[in-house]
Image: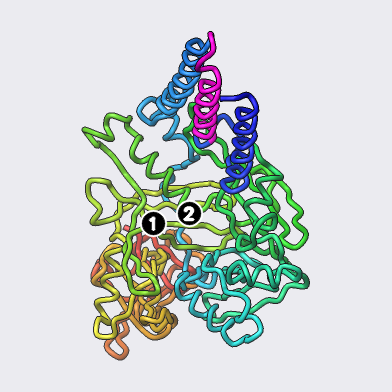
């Protein structure tokens, strides 16, 4: 091979590498295994070119040996790096990636916080969002609604937001000067959607191309930073932003993905800012998304008693629950899913915890803050989410409705699941409430208020519950319309009432008892 052809081939290789970087956006870090493979292929290509050039020269064999040694060394480095990053060697380190706190009780949201829980799921939100945009002729001809509806806290209330996106390359090319004009906001508890037009068009978005593609825009700002989960959020004024979680590999060379913060992008101007986990703007809601939390909680649950136990003894293995969901085409798939609640303008996700060897019921409950990564786990037995979803669907099986993933709440001191039932178009039709301990006790109705009233037989506790010790001065049983209520008066002349239970026959005037009450409704504490 002549020298000039060697130079031409090397130049072409450089051009090919530039294209690979531009298209695949490999993070320039020693911890990026993909970058190692690119380098390995480059070294192999250069080795072949140099060997071809030096083949008939006196030092040809030496050149071949040198290039072979380099390639073998790179392969060994990747293999050794993968081994020292493995769960087999680092079980304890993997089990500590998440900051998991075990508590006696995770405080479940009460009935008074139902307005903080978005019962409508993403599939139903898509239906409302598409209908809203479908009525706007000028918009729908050029843009589509993204399917990535994000549950965020907006003015301390849950909403789901999704930006418009370009409907392909040619629509981007025709509209790139003005950008994407707005986004859809769904209020899941009101079952309404609105289109929000931004004051200026968003140009740096995931559906754009070339330098305006959002992932590429971030990459060339931070080529050495790992990031993923690019998603849409809005601040308290409704201004749109994109947020990408940043992370590092902290175990060995390629293992232990740990969140370090976020990159926030103004899609109008392209301005980017990088924040650590402790410096995030208050309006940013999602840095530790639910899927990341579920994945590493499952790793924690698998390795909690060591790597070899996860393969053989399998003692004490736990994992987050999965459930069967259905897409807009009616196709089923099994996945992690979550309930959500807005608390102090943060979004908390929660789901059940089950034993790996027996997934017929839950043994606990996980709640996590998606902004701070704070995770609390409480252990108590309950029916798993999949079972209560199928049970609720069975109550109206003639209608063919599908249940959304349920939220676990506190109803009068009792854990209960609440969920919506949807028709085959994804529209919310009914509400179901199921006792978490005994799912044969359930109510399905066409409104949440009616379902709550029936489930509690009219005794809905909406205030904070407190435990107190009282001396019973008087007790009365009153039956109305077939329902028996118990009324008690304590020594301070406070009056409480509750649905009748057989154990209440054991209490009488003059007796001291412990109750849980909101000041009006009570339940006995054994």
Above/below status of 10 relative to 445: above
Does the segment drawn in magenta span residue 51?
A: yes
Q: Main secondary structure of the magenta part?
A: helix
Q: Is residue 458 visible?
A: no
Mark 1 in CB contact with mark 2 (< 8 angstroms): yes
Q: Is residue 80 visible?
A: yes
* Residue range of the region highlighted in magenta in the rendering: 35-58
Front residue of this view, candidates 486 and 342: 342
Q: Residue at x 69, y 60 (%)?
A: 204
**Which SS class for mark 1?**
strand
Pointer 1: what residue? 336
Above/below status of 133 relative to 23: below
Front residue of this view, candidates 12 and 158: 12
Does the segment drawn in magenta span residue 229?
A: no
In-image side of 507 versus 100 (left or right): left
Quadrant of the rendering where the C terminus is positioned: bottom left
Front residue of this view, candidates 200 and 384: 200
In-image side of 198 versus 396 (left or right): right
């Amino acid at each position: 091979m002549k020298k000039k052809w060697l130079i031409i081939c090397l130049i072409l290789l450089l051009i090919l590498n530039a294209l690979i970087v531009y298209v695949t956006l490999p993070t320039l870090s020693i911890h990026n295994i993909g970058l190692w493979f690119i380098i390995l292929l480059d070294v192999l290509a250069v080795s072949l070119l140099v060997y071809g050039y030096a083949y008939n020269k006196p030092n040809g064999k030496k050149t071949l040996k040198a290039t072979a040694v380099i390639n073998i060394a790179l392969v060994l480095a990747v293999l050794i790096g993968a081994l020292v990053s493995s769960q087999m060697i680092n079980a304890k380190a993997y089990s500590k990636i998440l900051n998991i706190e075990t508590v006696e009780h995770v405080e479940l949201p009460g009935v008074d916080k139902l307005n903080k829980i978005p019962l409508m799921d993403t599939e139903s939100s898509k239906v409302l969002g598409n209908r809203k945009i479908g009525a706007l002729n000028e918009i729908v001809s050029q843009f589509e609604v993204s399917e990535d509806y994000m549950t965020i806290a907006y003015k301390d209330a849950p909403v789901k937001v999704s930006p418009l996106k370009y409907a392909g390359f040619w629509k981007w090319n025709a509209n790139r000067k003005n950008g994407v004009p707005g986004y859809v906001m769904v209020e899941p508890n009101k079952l309404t959607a609105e289109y929000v037009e931004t004051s200026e068009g968003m140009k740096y978005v995931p559906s754009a191309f070339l330098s305006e593609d959002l992932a590429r825009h971030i990459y060339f700002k931070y080529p050495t930073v790992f990031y993923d989960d690019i998603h849409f959020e809005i601040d308290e004024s409704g201004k749109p932003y994109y947020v990408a979680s940043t992370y590092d590999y902290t175990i060995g060379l390629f293992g232990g993905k740990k969140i370090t913060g976020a990159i926030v992008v103004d899609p109008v101007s392209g301005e980017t800012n990088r924040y650590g986990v402790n410096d995030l703007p208050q309006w940013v809601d999602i840095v530790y998304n639910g899927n990341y939390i579920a994945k590493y909680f499952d790793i924690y649950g698998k390795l909690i008693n060591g790597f070899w136990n996860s393969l053989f003894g399998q003692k004490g293995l736990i994992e987050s629950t999965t459930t069967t969901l259905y897409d807009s085409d009616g196709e089923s798939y099994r996945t992690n899913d979550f309930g959500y609640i807005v608390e102090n303008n943060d979004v908390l996700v929660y789901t059940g915890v089950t034993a790996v060897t027996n997934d017929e019921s839950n043994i606990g409950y996980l709640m996590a803050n998606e902004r701070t990564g704070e995770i609390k786990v409480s252990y108590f037995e309950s029916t798993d989410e999949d079972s209560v979803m199928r049970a609720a669907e069975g109550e109206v099986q003639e209608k063919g409705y599908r249940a959304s993933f349920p939220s676990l709440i506190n109803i009068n001191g009792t854990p209960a699941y609440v969920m919506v039932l949807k028709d085959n178009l994804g529209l919310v039709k009914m509400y179901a409430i199921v006792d978490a301990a005994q799912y044969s006790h359930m109510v399905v109705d066409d409104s949440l208020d009616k379902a709550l009233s029936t489930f509690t037989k009219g005794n809905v506790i909406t205030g904070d519950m407190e435990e107190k010790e009282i001396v019973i001065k008087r007790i009365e049983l009153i039956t109305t319309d077939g329902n028996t209520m118990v009324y008690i008066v304590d020594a301070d002349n406070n009056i409480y009432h509750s649905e009748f239970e057989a154990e209440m026959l054991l209490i009488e005037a003059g007796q001291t008892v412990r109750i849980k009450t909101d000041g009006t409704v009570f339940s006995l504490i054994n």
